[in-house]
């Protein structure tokens, strides 16, 4: 795993950490893992911004084609976050390995693909993170899921014209 600190640029305070795990350049895929966002950024703009910076780094800088997310299926915060951030649910692996004192856990697998999900998610995150989407107390005016739905509807508008040569 390659660990990264999530640091508030204005205060210099570390708000959490996240890691790239299982990098596989040959197959152009990597997972996010070992995520801890402290109370200052968890379920707030800071956590979404940390995710945005990370996924942008994975797709736009490193050039990976697949970004994965997996978590204990009982960890509802993590599985909810994966969906919120635009990952596609792939399935449940039933106790894929022993993790602690002889016990295993079911793992939920999600992915985001560079050419399919990332363009919509990138635009949604950029719109959601705009300062005007937040009130004076820092609370969101529009949910990220709602921004994604709005953008998804725009791309599905039926076309009235075709191109002919």
Image (cartoon, rainbow, N blue to C red):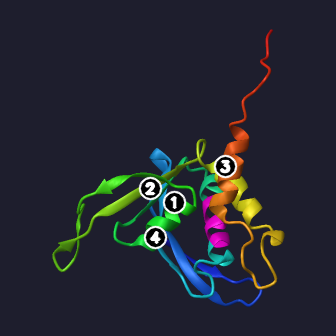
Mark carried by residue 110: 2
- Dominant secondary structure of the residues highlighted in magenta in the image: helix
Which numbered disc flags the more N-terminal residue, 1 or 2?
A: 1
Dot 1: element: helix
Marks 4/2: CA–CA distance:
11 Å
Marks 3/4: CA–CA distance:
21 Å
In the depicted structure, whether residue 109 falls above or below residue 78: above
Q: Are marks 1 and 4 in contact (CB under 8 Å)?
A: no
**Of 119 and 7, which appears nearest the observer?**
119
Which numbered disc flags the more N-terminal residue, 1 or 3?
A: 1
**Of 164 and 143, which appears nearest the observer?**
143
Dot 3: element: helix
Which numbered disc flags the more N-terminal residue, 3 or 4?
A: 4
- Residue 98 in percent (x, y) is at 21, 69
Marks 2/3: CA–CA distance:
17 Å
- What range of the chain is rendered magenta? 48-57
- Residue 81 in percent (x, y) is at 52, 67
Q: Residue at x 34, y 71 (%)?
A: 74
Magenta region includes residue 13: no
């Amino acid at each position: 795993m390659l660990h990264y600190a999530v640091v508030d640029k204005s205060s210099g305070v570390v708000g959490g950490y996240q890691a790239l795990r299982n990098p596989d350049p040959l197959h152009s895929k990597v997972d996010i893992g070992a995520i801890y966002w402290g109370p200052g950024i968890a379920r707030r703009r800071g956590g979404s911004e940390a995710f945005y910076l990370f996924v942008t780094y994975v797709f736009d800088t490193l050039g990976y084609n697949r970004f994965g997310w997996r978590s204990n299926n009982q960890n509802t915060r993590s599985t909810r976050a994966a969906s919120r951030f635009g990952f596609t649910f792939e399935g449940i692996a039933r106790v894929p390995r022993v993790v602690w004192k002889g016990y295993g856990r079911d793992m939920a697998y999600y992915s985001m693909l560079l050419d399919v999900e990332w363009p919509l998610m990138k635009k949604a995150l950029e719109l959601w993170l705009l300062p005007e989407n937040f009130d004076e107390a820092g609370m969101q005016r529009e949910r990220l899921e709602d921004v994604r739905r709005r953008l998804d509807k725009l791309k599905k508008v039926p076309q009235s014209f075709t191109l002919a040569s």
